[in-house]
Image (spheres, rainbow, N blue to C red):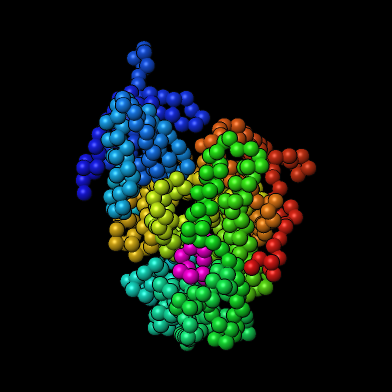
Amino acid sequence: MEFAELIKIAKVENVQLSCPGLLPVKGTLCITSHHLLLSSQPGGNGEQGMVELWLLLRNIDAVEKRVASSSGSITLKCKDLKVLQLEIPGMEECLNISRSIEALSSVESVMMMYPFFYRPQSMKLKDGWQLYPLQHYYQQIATETTAWRLSCVNGEFTVCPSYPAAVIVPTAVDDNTLKKAARFHQGGRFPILSYYHKKNGTVLLRSSQPLIGPNRKRCPEDEQLLSAALNRGERGFIIDTRSAQAAKQARMMGGGTESKSSYPCWRRLHGPLERGRPLQESFIKLVEACNDTSLSMDRWLSKLESSKWLAHLKGALSTACLAAQCMEREEACVLVHGAEGTDTTLLVTALAQVILDPECRTLTGFQGLLEREWIKAGHPFHFRCARSAYSHARLKQEAPIFLLFLDCVWQLGRQFPFSLEFNEHLLLVLFEHTYASSYGTFLCNSEKERCLCEVKEKTHSLWSWLNQPSQQKKHLNPLYTYNALVIWPSVEPQSLQLWQGLFLRWIRSSQYLDEAWAEIQRLVTSCEDAPEESAGDRQCHSQPDAAHPHRQTQLGNAG
């Protein structure tokens, strides 16, 4: 396929661009293979035209057009929730632009996407891809215990196509046992280590559902694997992210959950979480409500509630707290799974680590967590983020699971403003790049697919760009103070808020909030640069979140 075949018209003069919060601007619209550009017309006095729009076509979620006899208008609804209006002279030009945008924005081939063509001069292709290897994470665990080993049983991706080549498993279990256990789990996702809690030596495991089926099949190798994860005399918890009823129904379809008789040292809990279509529809309803500025207070609150987005946040945080409490307070190992083990399972294991581990709350630690628990763990970004909240296409496998995770992290940052080293801006950047990016980090559905597409050889890493000093500075929280304690969030309805910085981002100006944060940054910097003062005279240093009382989720209520 040639991009030129999809471009029906490459350039149109006198196009007017409008978007909320900005004055309309008129200029020349150009369409390239991957971008939509609008350069404003030069003013008098020999002024140069300015590039007013540089939009990645992959970011376009929906194209809506209206045509008249001599003109037309196109509304572009973007995956990052931005809405743009183009007024185009000429009906034929309007139709050709619309067709071009629709064709170019829906190219399915991964290797035809922009990251394979993006070549910034300041970066090298190899930079950033090896920043967070699993081997490095394993070495940190190996200094604490010899009970776990790094296995390359999946080196050719034949045991589990959605797992990385290397996984961390109990030392007492050999690779042949792992292969047999994999055949007993959906998609081959046998239990592997997700997180080692250094404080008490407990571990967080994840997998997909066991294939028990209606005949209650058993797998001695899977039972051996889970038994090896526990020390002698220990008990563990299995947290199923489905309801008990859904898990029972899954057994009739060949799936199911671990039985008490086969896994006597493991106790099963349920923390049911929505995924798939219900979550995508919730996202769509919330965005619709946020974009309707004519709503009365009653109607707004009603639509916010009916979207159920805040309920999904509560559910995710509650289940993550349940996992964290089992490890921290019960001092028990935890296995998390749902059905496939690539969506709500990763949501819970990743959130639990942010709650438990201060290292995961640093800028580099958080990036490592995303690499380990989302990207290498096989979350299908290509499927889940194919469409955002505006698309008119029929829903397939889209679901904003990763966005829900980012929103939960934002809730943690709001409740514990000193405990996260990164700020809201980083979360917004991650949201944008999962849906449309110049970088290859979130491409494809698994490490196997990235290897086949040669993503690491032919695209740039997002981490390489984010870790440049000029970018890193934008993503740091000026109030951050290292907090070694577990951060227990409140999950009461009154404690959860709409993430206005994302959902209202293009609807109202953030100018004053940005100015306030800039002033906070200036004050903190000036305090750090000031001569050392006596302890009694210090006014500038922030108090850690540990000074504030925690509102905690009770273990029995979280499931």
Q: Is residue 71 above or below residue 158?
A: above
Give the percent coordinates (x, y) of residue 277: 48, 58
Query: Along the horizontal axis of the image, is 113 left or right of 143?
Result: left
Which one is in front, 262 or 306? 306
Query: Along the horizontal axis of the image, is 71 left or right of 210?
Result: left
Q: Which range of residues does the magenta coloring cover? A: 333-347
Give the percent coordinates (x, y) of residue 199: 63, 68
Give the percent coordinates (x, y) of residue 370: 48, 57
Report the number of discs: 0
Residue 2 visible from this viewpoint: yes
Q: Which residue shows up at 48% across the image and 60% down it?
A: 276
Instruction: Pick out the residue farthest to the top.
Output: 45
Which one is in front, 148 or 162? 162
Give the percent coordinates (x, y) of residue 130: 40, 58
Query: Along the horizontal axis of the image, is 388 left or right of 514?
Result: left
Q: Is residue 136 above or below residue 192?
A: above
Q: Is residue 269 magenta?
A: no
